[in-house]
Amino acid sequence: MLEPARDIVLAITSSLRITASWESFRKMTKPDASAYITARASKESNAEASAIINRIKDYYGKKLWHQLTEDVKVAMMMPEISDKCGMYTEFVKEFESKLNAVSLAQIVIGAARSELADSPPKALAFVSELLDSDGKKTVVSGDSEAQVLLLSEVATLHLRSNETDVCKKRITVARELVDSSADMSSVVHSAFYKSAAEYHKVIGTAADFFKNALQFLAYTATENVPAAEQSQWAFDIGIAALVGTDVYNFGEVLAHGIMTNLKGSEHDWLLRLLEAFHEGDLQKFDKVCEASSAQMNDQPALVAHQEFIRQKITLLALMQLASARSDSRNLSFKEIQATCRMPPEEVEFLLMRAMSLGLITGVIDNVDEVVVISRVQPRVMDRAGIGMMAERLATWCSNVSATLESMGKNSKGIF
């Protein structure tokens, strides 16, 4: 009866010895961060690379984690530094739990972009190690900002591999984290909205691309967008504004500095087209279309939405007409017909369409063929629009003063 028990004890003892031996072997073979960075410092021949590697070595020895983190982030951006992935795997990984989670995510992303850009699957495997996998927690699991940075990068890599469904899932998870936090940094917001905009560009949802692209630009300084990409962003945003549903605020588009990249370029026609939409100027719109018909016909999105684009500029012409009236918001059907260049029988339909979209609010009088406008959807205005509003405000103030003066003269017996 004792034999089985003795066998069990021997098996457990043997197992413990094997485990202990494996732990000892693992510790012996674990990369030595100090030895690695010392070797790197002695091998660097480039002056700039040698300087920063030696600083990193010094900070590591003194356990100055913040200074070390900042220099490693810089090193990941330097073309003079080689084997960035190795620096993370053999050096940073040993003490990564001591670093700021967002900075750690930036280091990993920087290494992947620098050395694995030509191989999205390899980059994906490298970056994904820091994300939760099969319930396994990582050093950044508790940090929402770091999670969003990594998820955004992973989503972009899936998109480059034409895995749009997986990309969408990653963006959805990241968006939930962004929406649940009110104090994420601009760096994190910029990375997320860029990834989301690129996804919507690929699948062809213009309105969603437009919204996410504007958010990306709102959190990103123009100088931080590579010069080679600025013109492309400006062009894509301009096209999306024209064909996107529910996009009627063109002042918001033109107000961003990145749109100046279109001026004088091969896409200058697009800038002039956007200006025509912002001003609600049908005559200017027709002139641009006539002069740049060849360029516009080369854009499949514009060709496919040409009827919608004409409807949109007509609605904007109506909004501009209503906004420009300083004396009265009563518009006759004839005025609308002349300004919007349309048949009489289509005026009422135009008004109903504008009201259904929330562009204007008012009451249509079919008998007298008049519409009384009570509200026009607010828009971002340029200097000319602000000047017009200032004149209207001055007129209103003058009318109020005249009314008060009249009441003062004619109501002495009452007050």
Image (cartoon, helix red, strand yellow):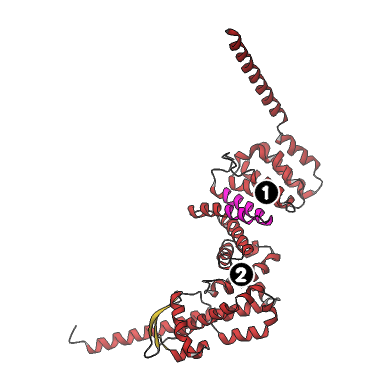
Identify the mark nearer the N-term, 1 or 2: 1
Vertical side of 236 occupied by 124: above or below = above
Quarter holding the C terminus is bottom left
270 or 33: nearer the viewer:
270
Q: Residues within 10 Å of mark 2 (few under 14, many from 20)?
A: many
Residue behind mark 1: 124
Q: Nearer the viewer, mark 1 or mark 2?
A: 1
Question: Can I make out residue 343 in this image?
Answer: yes
Q: Provide residue 131's location: percent of width, then percent of height.
A: 60, 44
Residue extending farthest front:
1
Q: Is residue 343 magenta?
A: no
Q: Residue at x 65, y 55 (%)?
A: 163
60 or 107: nearer the viewer:
107
Q: Is residue 154 magenta?
A: yes
Q: CA distance from mark 1 to mark 2?
A: 28 Å
Numbered-mark total: 2
SS for callout 1: helix
Q: Residue at x 72, y 43 (%)?
A: 87
Q: Residues within 10 Å of mark 1 (few under 14, many from 20)?
A: many
* Disc 1 + disc 2, Cβ < 8 Å: no
Vertical side of 400 occupied by 227: above or below = above
Q: Quadrant of residue 371?
A: bottom left
Q: Which residues are magenta?
A: 146-170
Q: Residue at x 23, y 89 (%)?
A: 410
SS for callout 2: helix
Residue 237 is tagged as 2
Q: Provide residue 303's location: percent of width, then percent of height.
A: 64, 77
Dominant SS in magenta = helix
Q: Is residue 338 left or right of residue 196?
A: left
Vertical side of 313 occupied by 61: above or below = above
